[in-house]
């Protein structure tokens, strides 16, 4: 409804070809994900599971993948609470 009311034409990308999947793995940068830790205390990052402290049960965390360091850092309330090896082959 809002789109129709805006009276603006839709704009599509000039390339109609979808990107090739799987994407190339990154070689640099940091990627941030927000996740809720449930009662099983498992952090799920793209299908990989990491067990976390019971202090994080039912809490939202920010998981940062640091490509250069090959680490997964877990933050709660802006404080780093966990760190895991995260090897990108």
Image (cartoon, rainbow, N blue to C red):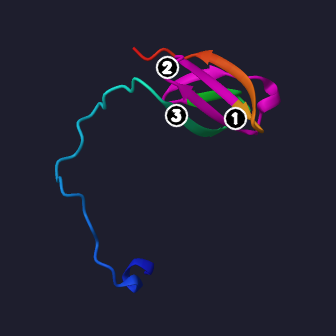
Q: Earlier in the sequence, mark 3 or mark 1?
A: 3
Which quadrant holds residue 26?
A: top left
At horizontal 40% and vertical 23% (from top left) the residue drawn is 27
The quarter in which the C terminus is drawn is top left
- Of callouts 2 and 1, which one flags the residue occurring earlier in the amino acid sequence? 1
Nearest to the eye among marks 2 and 1: give it. 2
Q: Quadrant of residue 33?
A: top right
Residue marked by disc 1: 37
Disc 2 marks which residue? 68
Q: Which residues are drawn in magenta?
A: 45-74
Helix, strand or loop status at disc 1: loop
- Disc 3 to disc 2, C-alpha distance: 11 Å
Do the residues under discs 3 and 2 have CB atoms within 8 angstroms?
no
Residue 34's image quarter?
top right
Can residue 15 be found in the magenta stretch? no
Q: On the image, numbered disc 3 is attached to which residue?
A: 31
| 80 left or right, relative to 21 | right
Instruction: State how far apart marks 2 and 1 are (Cα).
Output: 26 Å
Which residue does the image show at 62% across and 16% down from the upper left?
A: 84
């Amino acid at each position: 409804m809002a789109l129709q009311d805006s009276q603006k034409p839709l704009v599509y990308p000039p390339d109609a070809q979808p990107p090739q999947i799987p994407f190339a793995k990154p070689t640099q940068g940091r990627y941030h994900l927000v996740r809720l830790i449930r009662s099983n205390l498992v952090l799920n990052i793209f299908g990989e599971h990491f067990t976390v402290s019971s202090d994080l049960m039912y809490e939202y965390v920010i998981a940062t993948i640091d490509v250069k360091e090959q680490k997964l850092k877990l933050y709660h309330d802006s404080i780093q609470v966990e760190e895991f090896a995260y090897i990108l082959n």
